[in-house]
Image (cartoon, rainbow, N blue to C red):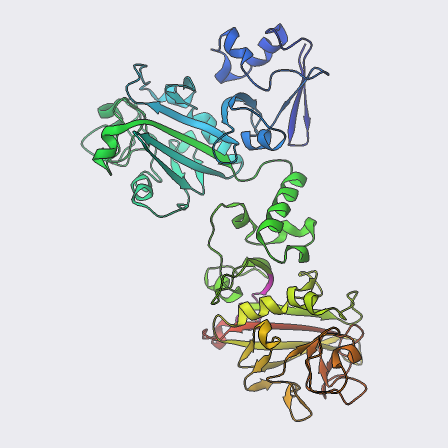
């Protein structure tokens, strides 16, 4: 007797009575329900790697080969997987290529005498064997690639040469659109990728279903196999006549062709969040400033799942790319040296948008703010709330082009309603650590008085100070006196003239000594903002 149960979306568990040393009737009944496994011989069924029960008689089915590979070292071979929203399917998992976890889509060996199918129905289903000519089937390719994003690897082998052609996305439409092929961005630039991109967005064609763009010929009939044809001169591999139009010398030596796909994200929602967070920690310098449960709030989080992705250098560039949502983004500043990926909070709906937040602080913040030099160097807090981005990242950010800064100060009126006003500097730049992150400011404008470049508090061209590194011009350590790191000149009074990093209060003389909230942000100045484009302005 076979019973089925689903544990979340990660596992599909089968309870089977019997031993793995023989094909029991329970195994046979289960496999008979898998449409592409019915033709297996009893010997082949024994080779299905994950249909060998554990001591409790349980078989765990995972949604893809990558999930299988993540949960223990597995050999390459036949496995039954259970996509989240579809029936179980028999696949071949390649656990050796790169980090393993690849699903075999197709294999062709030149000179193999096995016949190739020619009809539409044949290509909808699995045919061949994993060691020779093999095709997973358009029905299963559609089901798999509709559930999640897959990378794809096309492998050409000939003589002593192997060529890998990788794209960051592989998707197959349903039969209603003739199983059209959708390729993502090439993971490296080469003429090989350009050749395959000619097949991008093409519908699948067979001898009895001509969907190619050649008006004079049926390409599938001409070459004796189904494929995503553009015209009859495009790449084609489902035939004894492997067609690779780019390099004729390579074509003559081409011995084998393989297509594999790798899920970009598998597991349950909780496990996927954990996997994404682990990837964030590996790739992003200030990942600790993002709570694990909020990792999927990063708007461009999918880029972290790509093996190669191009990141914007700031929020302004993201805005020009079409991102208009406030929130977290991963960026990569471009400076004179190699810079890391960092997570920042972008303000996209204020004053033309494209602002990168350097600091946000509320009154009576839970953070101490009286931190060490190293803590201020690399940042602290929750980038979704109160936080300081970090002087090293501010240096990377503000030295790639000209930036201006805006300080938004919120103060409650007598009725308790929060009123916002701003101060703006048309140049804002922070020097390297060798200069102690010296501050450089341009001309001031705004609806509140200047507090950073006035005789009472001239901090332009002043270095940064913390409680453990005194860089100011006073005889005492101003950062230690006031309880937070900042750009100080001197500190003669009991309270600071302007300081946005003290735990208890926010100071900006003479506008306020006790503001409720502050946001300190920058935007590149190579942007023309017209009144009709302004989304909101304070």
Q: Nearer the viewer, residue 232 or 159?
A: 159
Q: Residue 371, percent across and down? A: 74, 68
Q: Residue at x 28, y 36 (%)?
A: 230
| Residue 161, image x, y percentages | 32, 34
| Residue 65 percent coordinates (x, y) | 54, 29
The answer to whether 526 is drawn above or below residue 307 in the figure is: below
Q: Quadrant of residue 243?
A: top left
Regarding residue 328, the answer to whether it shows in the image is yes
Residue found at x 60% / y 79%: 438
| Direction from residue 439 to residue 189 in the image, left or right | left
The number of callouts visible is 0
450 or 159, nearer to the observer: 159
Q: Is residue 346 above or below residue 237?
A: below
Residue 32 visible, this angle: no
Quadrant where the image shows the C terminus:
bottom right
Magenta highlight on residue 236: no
Q: Position of residue 73 (x, y in %)?
A: 60, 28
Instruction: Indicate the quadrant containing the N terminus: top left, top right, bottom left or bottom right.
Output: top right
Residue found at the far bottom of this picture:
455
Q: Is residue 431 left or right of residue 239?
A: right
User: Which stretch appears magenta?
Assistant: 344-354
Residue depicted at 45% across the width and 43% down the height: 168
Q: Is 348 within the magenta?
A: yes
Residue occupying the point 45% across, 29% down = 141
Place residue 508 in its image quadrant.
bottom right
Left or right: residue 491 versus residue 130 is right
Q: Quadrant of residue 214?
A: top left
> For the stretch drawn in magenta, what is the main secondary structure?
loop
Position above or below: 340 against 408: above
């Amino acid at each position: 007797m076979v019973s089925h149960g689903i544990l979340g979306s990660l596992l599909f568990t089968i309870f089977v009575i019997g031993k793995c040393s023989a094909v029991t009737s329970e195994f046979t009944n289960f496999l008979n329900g898998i449409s592409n496994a019915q033709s297996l011989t009893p010997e082949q069924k024994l080779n299905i790697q994950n249909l060998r029960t554990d001591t409790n008689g349980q078989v765990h089915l995972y949604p893809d080969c990558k999930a299988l590979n993540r949960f223990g070292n597995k050999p390459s071979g036949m496995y039954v997987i259970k996509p989240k929203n579809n029936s179980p399917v028999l696949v071949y998992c390649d656990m050796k290529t790169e980090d393993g976890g690849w699903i075999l889509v197709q294999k062709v060996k030149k000179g193999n005498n096995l016949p190739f199918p020619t009809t539409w129905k044949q290509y909808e289903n699995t045919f061949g064997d994993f060691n020779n000519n093999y095709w997973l089937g358009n029905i299963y390719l559609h089901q798999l690639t509709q559930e999640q994003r897959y990378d794809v690897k096309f492998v050409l082998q000939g003589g002593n040469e192997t060529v890998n052609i990788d794209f960051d996305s592989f998707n197959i439409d349903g039969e209603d659109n003739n199983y059209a092929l959708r390729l993502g961005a090439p993971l490296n630039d080469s003429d090989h990728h350009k050749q395959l991109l000619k097949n991008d967005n093409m519908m699948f064609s067979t001898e009895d279903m001509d969907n190619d763009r050649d008006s004079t010929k049926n390409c599938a009939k001409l070459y004796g196999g189904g494929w995503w044809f553009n015209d009859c001169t495009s790449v084609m591999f489902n035939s004894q006549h492997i067609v690779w139009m780019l390099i004729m010398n390579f074509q003559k030596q081409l011995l084998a062709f393989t297509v594999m796909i790798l899920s970009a994200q598998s597991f349950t929602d909780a496990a996927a969040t954990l996997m994404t967070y682990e990837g964030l920690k590996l790739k992003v310098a200030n990942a600790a400033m993002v709570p694990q449960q909020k990792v999927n709030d990063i708007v461009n989080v999918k880029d972290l799942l790509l093996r190669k992705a191009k990141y914007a250098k700031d929020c302004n560039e993201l805005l020009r790319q079409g991102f208009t949502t406030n929130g977290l983004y991963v960026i990569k500043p471009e400076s004179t040296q190699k810079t890391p990926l960092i997570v920042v909070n972008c303000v996209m709906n204020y004053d033309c948008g494209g602002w990168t937040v350097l600091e946000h602080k509320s009154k009576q913040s839970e953070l101490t703010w009286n931190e060490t030099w190293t803590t201020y160097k690399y940042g602290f807090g929750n980038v979704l709330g109160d936080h300081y981005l970090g002087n090293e990242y501010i240096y990377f950010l503000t030295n790639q082009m000209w930036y201006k800064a805006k300080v938004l100060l919120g103060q409650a009126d007598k009725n308790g309603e929060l009123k916002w006003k701003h101060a703006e500097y048309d140049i804002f730049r922070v020097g390297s650590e060798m200069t102690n992150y010296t501050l450089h400011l341009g001309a001031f404008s705004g609806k509140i008085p200047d507090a950073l470049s006035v005789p009472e508090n001239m901090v332009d061209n002043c270095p940064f100070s913390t409680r453990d590194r005194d860089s100011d011009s006073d005889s005492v350590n101003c950062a230690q006196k006031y309880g937070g790191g900042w750009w100080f000149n001197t500190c003669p009074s009991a309270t600071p003239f302007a300081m946005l990093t003290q735990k208890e209060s926010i100071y900006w003389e003479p506008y306020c000594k006790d503001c409720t909230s502050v946001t300190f942000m920058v935007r590149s100045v190579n942007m023309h903002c017209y009144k009709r484009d302004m989304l909101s302005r304070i």
